[in-house]
Image (cartoon, rainbow, N blue to C red):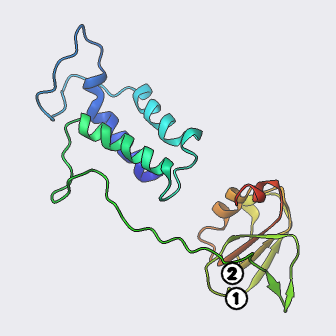
């Protein structure tokens, strides 16, 4: 998101002369920006609204929505006269994305017994072990650190829980099954 926002900001700053109101559009003769213009907040807002809007559904990696966002930014770069990086024939770099898939439903086991009504949100393909923390509150800012973290409340959104556990060493995050977690699959 930060990279796309920075690209949009750069694009907007470089494209401002193209959006300036004139009697007739002048052809672009140089990639160098004009010196007599000012970037307007509404220009930046328009790009950000599109790239961060719900229509692109979060721009997940290797999704149609990410491809739309990349094409949008690439088209702006081309329109501003920017050249692809040396050795590249495009503004977009293609990479192979590997997505591991589970071959069945994940099972959360504690002391050899399955935990019912839990949804695995964050975790690797390996077995997770470490200190366990259980949080029953509703304030994401108060979520404790724990390598294995069980969230007892269904009132914290999955995305808020993930953001709150970043940087706390969480290897496995388990949320109570809810309508919000059901939408993730």
Find residue 59 and report its horizontal and vertical position in percent.
51, 50
Who is closer to the viewer here, 75 or 23? 75
| Residue 153 image position (x, y, % from top left) | 85, 62
Which residue is outermost to the front?
A: 103
Residue 127 screen position, x and y as percent: 67, 87
Q: How many marks?
A: 2
Would you name the residue on which mark 2 appears?
Answer: 147
Q: Of callouts 1 and 2, which one flags the residue occurring earlier in the amino acid sequence? A: 1
How far apart marks 1 and 2 lie (CA) works out to 7 Å
Residue 167 lies in what quarter of the image? Answer: bottom right
- Dividing the picture into quadrants, the one containing residue 132 is bottom right
Q: Is residue 37 above or below residue 63?
A: above
Q: Circles 1 and 2: CB distance less than 8 Å?
A: yes
Q: Position of residue 24 (x, y in %)?
A: 22, 10
Residue 61 horizontal side relative to residue 94, left or right: right
Determine which residue is flagged by label 1: 129
Closer to the camera, 133 or 28?
Answer: 28
- Tag 2: Cα neighbours inside 10 Å, few (<14), some, or many (≥20)? some
Few, some or many residues within 10 Å of mark 1 (<14, 14–19, 20+): few
Point out the frontmost of discs 1 and 2.
Answer: 1
Looking at the rendering, in which quadrant would you find the C terminus?
Answer: bottom right
Residue, x 25% and y 34% (percent of image)?
79
Q: Residue at x 69, y 77 (%)?
A: 172
């Amino acid at each position: 998101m930060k990279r796309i926002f920075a690209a949009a900001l750069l694009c907007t700053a470089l494209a401002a002369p193209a959006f300036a109101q004139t009697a007739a559009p002048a052809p672009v003769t140089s990639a160098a920006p004009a010196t007599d213009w000012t970037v307007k907040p509404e220009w930046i807002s328009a790009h950000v609204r599109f790239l961060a809007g719900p229509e692109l559904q979060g721009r997940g990696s290797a999704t149609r929505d990410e491809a739309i966002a990349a094409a949008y930014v690439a088209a702006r770069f081309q329109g501003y006269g920017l050249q692809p990086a040396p050795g590249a024939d495009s503004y977009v770099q293609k990479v192979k994305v590997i997505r591991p898939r589970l071959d069945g439903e994940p099972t959360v086991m504690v002391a050899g017994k399955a935990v019912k009504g839990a949804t695995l949100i964050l975790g690797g393909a390996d077995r997770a072990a470490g200190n366990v923390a259980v949080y029953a509150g509703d304030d994401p800012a108060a979520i404790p650190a724990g390598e294995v973290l069980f969230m007892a409340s269904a009132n914290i959104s999955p995305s808020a829980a993930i953001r709150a556990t970043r940087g706390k060493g969480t290897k496995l995050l388990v949320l109570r099954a809810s309508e919000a977690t059901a939408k993730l699959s």
